[in-house]
């Protein structure tokens, strides 16, 4: 009788553990639902674009480069300068001049000058226009770089978002399996009580139930960890947690060749490097223009007031001058060096453009193939899941009638769980591959933030 008493005590302990575990899980989920922030995919992408430090830094660089356009253009603008000076001289006592010694006296002398001057580069034969064009191209490249950073931040957020969405579905699969094991334990207890099954079958069902609870706990922990990763991708506090609303499906062209062509044509990373190469060549042209002459004009005018001893304020004297100056650089060793630097930068940009173009085409082709692969796996998983559900339904009915063994039921439950997990993972892989494909073409961002990009 002692083994039977031991089993009875074990069953009561397992039952109490089941109730406590279920209540604890419910409370944790309720707390998460209360504290977490619920986001759509559009919300996640908008937050990533607005909050990512890399995006803010890239946009600040755009502002810097746009300001440099004005700096380059300013060399041909007129310059107007005003200045004023004053001088005072005071002497008391004898003054010593070569050959003469004066008697004691006091001597005061005051002057005041005011000058206004203006200068203007009438033409520099293309220096400024070339430098301005180079600065404008550099600013445009920086703008495209900012869009590339936005796309990277949005892609990271979108991928993390889809992972969280399908984490929830995987947790739902684990919970459904847990419900199956709970029904199995209830049926087994009834069969044991009726003498149809051995008590060891009830213990086996209890162990299977605890294994399912472990799977639910693991799925819940993974979901929370991935939610924290999503919050981090959005530059939010990872401890706050987030909930997500599943996104609508987006149609994409999964033909590898067309996907590669579209990516090269639309990718902001490719257009950024193309513009960088163009800007480097423009800087070389601007550096070459350093050999050109400059024609400038300048003019100035001034007035002087003088006050000496016993003279009061003398009549002011005026002066004015004007000139046109032609400057021709005869030798400047820095010009050739600047040209070589710009040419080398253009070569670097061209090589980097070729590398990134190949990388973008490869990523788009790979993503398109992954979409097709995940879709095929998903279709097969759906067929497997349908068969597994039908099989499990029959096995559960026969088990309740005492016609099948617990091992056969556990096997049917395992196949059903595996099939449902495969369906969720295939859907997740399709979503992730589509996100990568949309990212390579820039479609993930939609329209640029403003017309300058």
Image (cartoon, rainbow, N blue to C red):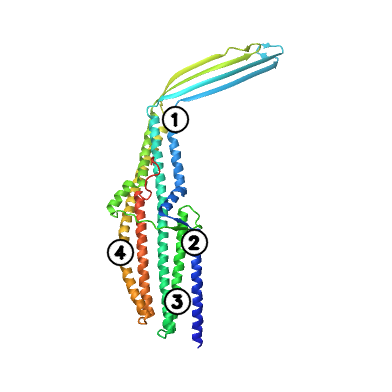
Residue at image mark 3? 207
The label shown at residue 418 is none
Choose between 254 and 261: the one closer to the eye: 254
Asked which secondary structure carries label 1, the reply is helix
Residue at image mark 4? 379
Q: Residues within 10 Å of mark 2 (few under 14, many from 20)?
A: some
Q: Nearer the viewer, mark 4 or mark 1?
A: 4
Q: Which residue is painted at 44% across and 80% down in the image?
A: 189
Q: Is residue 12 above or below residue 358?
A: below
Q: Quadrant of residue 164?
A: bottom left
Q: Which residue is painted at 43% across and 79% down in the image?
A: 204
Residue 314, image x and y in percent? 60, 12
Q: Quadrant of residue 63?
A: top left
Residue at image mark 1? 74
Q: Nearer the viewer, mark 2 or mark 3?
A: 2
Q: Residues within 10 Å of mark 3 (few under 14, many from 20)?
A: some
Residue at image mark 2? 32
Gap in Å between the C-alphas at discs 4 and 3?
33 Å
Count the numbered circles shown: 4
Q: Residues within 10 Å of mark 4 (few under 14, many from 20)?
A: some
């Amino acid at each position: 009788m002692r083994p039977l008493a031991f089993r009875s005590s074990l069953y009561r302990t397992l039952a109490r553990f089941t109730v406590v575990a279920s209540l604890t899980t419910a409370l944790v989920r309720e707390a998460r639902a209360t504290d977490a922030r619920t986001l759509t995919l559009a919300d996640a992408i908008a937050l990533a674009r607005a909050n990512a430090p890399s995006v803010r830094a890239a946009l600040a660089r755009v502002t810097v480069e746009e300001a440099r356009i004005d700096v380059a253009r300013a060399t041909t603008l007129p310059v107007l300068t005003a200045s004023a000076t004053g001088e005072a001289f005071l002497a008391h006592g004898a003054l010593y001049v070569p050959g003469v010694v004066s008697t004691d006296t006091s001597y005061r002398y005051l002057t005041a000058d005011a000058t206004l001057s203006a200068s203007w580069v009438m033409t520099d034969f293309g220096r400024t226009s070339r430098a301005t064009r180079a600065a404008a191209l550099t600013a445009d490249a920086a703008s495209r770089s900012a869009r590339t950073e936005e796309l990277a931040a949005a892609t990271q957020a979108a991928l993390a978002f889809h992972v969280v969405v399908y984490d929830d579905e995987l947790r739902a699969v684990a919970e459904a399996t847990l419900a199956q094991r709970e029904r199995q334990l209830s049926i087994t207890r009834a069969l044991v009580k009726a003498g149809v099954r051995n008590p060891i079958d009830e213990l086996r069902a209890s162990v299977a139930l605890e294994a399912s609870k472990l799977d639910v706990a693991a799925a819940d922990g993974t979901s929370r960890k991935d939610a924290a990763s999503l919050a981090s991708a959005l530059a939010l506090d990872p401890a706050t947690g987030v909930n997500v609303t599943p996104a609508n499906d987006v149609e994409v062209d999964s033909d590898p060749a067309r996907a590669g062509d579209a990516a090269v044509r639309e990718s902001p990373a490719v257009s950024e490097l193309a513009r960088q190469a163009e800007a480097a060549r423009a800087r070389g042209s601007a550096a070459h223009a350093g050999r050109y002459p400059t024609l400038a004009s300048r003019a100035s005018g001034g007035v002087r007031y003088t006050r000496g001893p016993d003279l009061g304020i003398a009549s002011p004297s005026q002066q004015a001058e004007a000139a046109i100056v032609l400057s021709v650089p005869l030798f400047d060793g820095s010009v050739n060096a600047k040209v070589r630097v710009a040419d080398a930068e253009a070569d670097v940009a061209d090589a980097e453009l070729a590398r990134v173009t190949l990388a973008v085409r490869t990523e788009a082709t790979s993503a398109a193939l992954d979409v097709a692969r995940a879709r095929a796996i998903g279709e097969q998983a759906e067929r497997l899941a349908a068969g597994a559900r039908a099989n499990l339904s029959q096995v559960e009915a026969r088990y309740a009638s005492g016609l099948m063994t617990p091992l056969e039921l556990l096997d049917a439950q395992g196949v059903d769980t595996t099939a449902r997990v495969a369906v969720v993972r295939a859907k997740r892989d399709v979503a992730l591959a589509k996100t990568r494909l949309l990212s390579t073409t820039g479609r993930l961002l939609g329209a640029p933030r403003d017309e300058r990009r």
